[in-house]
Amino acid sequence: MKHKSNTAPLYEALLAYRDSGQRSFHVPGHKNGQVYRRLLEQADQQQLDGGAVEIHRNEGEAKGKQSSGRSVPVGEDCFRQAEEERYGNKIHGLTVHAENETDASAADVVPVSAFLEMMRLDVTEISGTDDLHHPEGVILEAQQLAADCFGAEESFFLVGGSTSGNLSLLLTVCNEPNSLVLVQRNVHKSIIHGLMLAGARAVFLEPWVDPTSGLAVMPSLETVQAAVQAHPEAKGVLVTLPNYYGMGADLKPIAEVCHEAGMPLLVDEAHGAHYGQHPELPASALSCGADGVVQSTHKMLSAFTMGAMLHVQGPRLNRSLLRQRLAMVQSSSPSYPVMASLDLARRLLHTQGANAFTAGLAAVDAFKRGLAELPRFRLLQPWQQLQQEPPAGTKPVAGGNAEAAGAPGRLEALPAAALPSAAGYTAQDPFKAVIYDGTGVLSGYGLQQQLEVRGCVPEMSDERYVVLLFSLGSTLRDAEHLLQALQQISLEQEQSQSLGEQSQRLTKEAINFISTWNNFQESTPFSEPIPFTLQPIMEEDTTEVSIDNCVGLRSAEMVTPYPPGIPLVYAGERISAAMITRIKLLRDEGARFHGVSDTSLQSLKIIRE
């Protein structure tokens, strides 16, 4: 390897370009930010000519400043002073325009200085900056360093987020029409789009559901084994790990099953780019034997938004075809600042190693210790650690068990595949602090709203839980602010209402609670093959059927409860009795649905057969 791990070849190439002073006769059109700097030069000239720039009211005021020993700011200095006057030294993004846009001054139309400086690094494929789609220089070296850092045989930079990685993987393994893939049912929509683009068929694997939290994790080993045996012709297996809540389990047994059948294991590890980089973090998918792994480097590490990586190893993926697919789904004009941020994120890990996470882990540990002092709020943890804690939404009783079956607030009935099993949920990302209101007064949505009012913006929430995302960039001050917010919420709720009365009311209402996160089928661990295509289902080939009469028919529309947007029924999928039961329960509980023509869910659009 030409470069040492403490270098960032792509980033350093951009710095060299910036400092070279070369004249740009190529794209991008802003010419290293020169289009805006020209306005600053014009403002400079106006000052020298005695022109009235908006920032300085008149020449007398300027001369007064000069006579008092203060210099009159010109050019970029003039602009920076305007920033300080308008924003108090805070960078808020692009400036607003003056009332009369044709008379706007430089300070009204020029971006803030940080954005302007970034434009100096926004280049394209020229001599010395390499080409993402045919890397031979600094990009190749940066990707090789990434592979070394993350334990891959080969790594690829992604400028379209993990979406572009998922698309390219599916388009690689599905190398002929009607290719069959075994896919975890509750996957990101980019997986569905990849199946459509490939014209593939999918057998959907039902996820294992943690009985304590009621949240879906990933398909069990038994489900994967059964599906592989039933469909030996499948081109591969695709799972998501960890889930949005940081929950996961051991991936090695699943990788072994796939490899014994000659199938590659593909993993959407969008939320696990940091895995395997510290002893307190779960193992990475690559270390567990996955063949193709997609990571959103921007989610849990330090890259810019949209910056992601695709890592591959082993002989089961056609890498030549994969490079072709990547060129298809990624822009031919990739963002160099985004790619440089990937290079820097990797260098940070390479040079600091596990120490890069010390401060962030200390922050989340401080938060969890403080949370233990607030009995109202509880923390989601693997089942083994929660044997003394009742499931969320249930009334605590002696011994820590939930009330007897049939009691108010118990979790919805789970299929046999979701019964307690230590192997289903054994790993929790420490940086994902998933909390809930143990009294049942505040839903996850309500708790998120209360936190945001107090200056804490969570990653996401659902009906019950709030996901608080820490990272290597989190600080003890962040944890302190969050704890103070939760303390305020708890005190204000106690003062404004009777917790006991409202908790009793909400617990009573929770009898029929059905989570939209867990779209599983009780009757079978996996579906029949479902075809995907870009060709729309023609209206004349469909008919409206009462929802009570849809069992056994093929759906012409995708039935997707929101949030979070995980399809319950796919277009072309044959509808089971369990699906209808679940749709009706969700409908009656007031859930919102996307993708259906009858939003009241009294009927479904069915394919004529």
Image (spheres, rainbow, N blue to C red):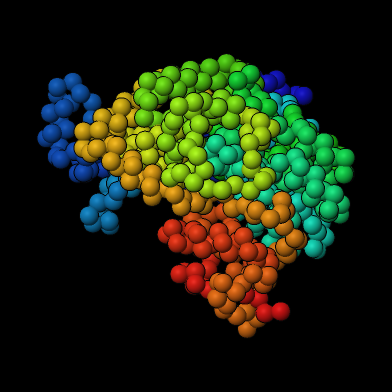
Q: Residue at x 23, y 56 (%)?
A: 100
> In which quadrant of the rendered image does the N terminus lie?
top right
The spot of residue 330 in percent (x, y) is: 65, 50
Residue 361, position as x, y percentages in the image: 51, 20
Is residue 71 left or right of 547 when viewed as pictured?
left
| In the foreground, 583 or 486 | 583
Residue 347 or 114: which is nearer the viewer? 347
Location of residue 141 with respect to 173 vertically, above or below: above
Farthest-out residue, bottom? 540
Residue sitting at 75 percent across and 51 percent down? 182
Q: In the displayed structure, does residue 153 sit left or right of residue 542? A: right
The C terminus lies in quadrant: bottom right
List x then y, in percent, for residue 282. Answer: 64, 27
Residue 509 place in picture, x, y as percent: 38, 50
Quarter of the figure with residue 113: top left
Q: Nearer the viewer, residue 242 or 11?
A: 242
Answer with the quarter of the image where residue 106 lies: top left
